[in-house]
Amino acid sequence: MEEKRKILFGVLNWGLGHATRSWELINKYVLAGHEVVLASDGVAAEFLSAEFPLLKIISIPGYNIKYGKGAGLVQMLFNALRTNRAVIAEKKFLDDYLSKNEFDLIVSDNRYGLFSDSVKSIIITHQLNIKVPFGSKAVNWQNHKWLNRFDEVWVPDKNAELSGELTHPIPHGINKPVMEIGLLSRFKNLNQTKGQEIDVLAIVSGPEPQKTILVKKLQQIFEESRYKTVLYTGEVNLRKTIKKGNLTIKSHAETNEFYKDLSTAKVVIGRSGYSSLMDYSVMKKSFITIPTPGQDEQLYLAKMLSKKGIPVLLQSELSKEKVEQAIQKAQLYNSTK
């Protein structure tokens, strides 16, 4: 019988993706009887608190990464500085916290500062090779330096099928064990629910201001659409539902309600964030992806998907006609798989 452990589980607040994919591992630890303490901030912390109300959650410094209307060197440098400051701050926070609290294991979903020399520390990431438009060598040198502070690196994939060049080949700069743990999704092993079908489920996530920009564009398109659509706006702290013709707008829903909508949707529209793609893959959904402007990883993943025949739309070029064409293409793609 496995020995019960006290686990500190840290989750990056970068939209909801890291929180939703961590859900599966957190739930497994809880069901196995381990004592789990969660550590996060912002909407990720709000999501985890709602999903695991019995678990203690501590607030830690955020990264505050932003993607503006334009992407370039200045934006990239600002984000790099914010990340470096955040890593230093969360490491200091962890050292202070560990001086008063004992743990047997630290698991960090992409929070580089949550490691300890005295406690086994594992980082979950699909970013062994970070995609950037320039400065790749320097960015990945720093990335590998941070990853090497952990005892193990866990990659949520199998044979690099979804992550591609982000994880394969394993960079020579990483000198700690790297293990693939399979796709992570809170919807794994759940039975598909039955109910009234939704033509389109649109899910908006990720950092501001791009999240709000996309919400407004999709709302405008689907308010006058013939498709029965549910639009999730990703506002975790709200529980608000608005109906406008064939469009239902939901700020957020807990896992069971969201899973029902996802199960019954004919086509899903969402970001090409890695966690979202894992959910769609696990559930074998027809989907359309809209990469976050300025987020090179999402652009890379969208390009990979496009080569497989999956529709990709650019946020700056969204229109009712292009969205409807993509919906038809997604349905056709699924029927020929």
Image: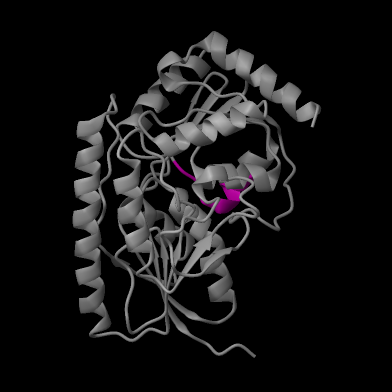
Q: Residue furthest front?
A: 172
In the image, residue 168 lies at what x, y percent?
55, 50
Query: Where's the N terminus, which quadrant?
Result: bottom right
Q: Is residue 49 visible?
A: yes
**Left or right for 108, reference 283:** left
In the image, residue 129 lies at what x, y percent?
44, 48
In the image, residue 97 lies at what x, y percent?
24, 78
Q: Is residue 199 visible?
A: no
Q: Is residue 222 above or below residue 156?
A: above
Q: Residue at x 56, y 46 (%)?
A: 163
Query: Where's the C terminus, which quadrant?
Result: top right
Numbered-mark total? 0
Q: Nearer the viewer, residue 206 or 179?
A: 179
| Magenta segment boundaries in residue numbering | 252-260
Q: Is residue 138 above or below residue 36?
A: above
Q: Residue at x 73, y 48 (%)?
A: 192
**Left or right for 15, reference 30:** left
Magenta-highlighted stretch: main secondary structure?
helix
How is the rendered protein coloured?
one colour
- Residue 259 in the magenta stretch? The answer is yes
**Left or right for 24, reference 142:** right
- Residue 131 in the magenta stretch? The answer is no
Q: Residue at x 57, y 42 (%)?
A: 277
Q: Nearer the viewer, residue 221 or 195?
A: 221
Q: Nearer the viewer, residue 244 or 228?
A: 228
Quadrant in the picture for residue 196: top right
In the image, residue 309 lies at what x, y percent?
67, 25
Q: Residue furthest right?
A: 336
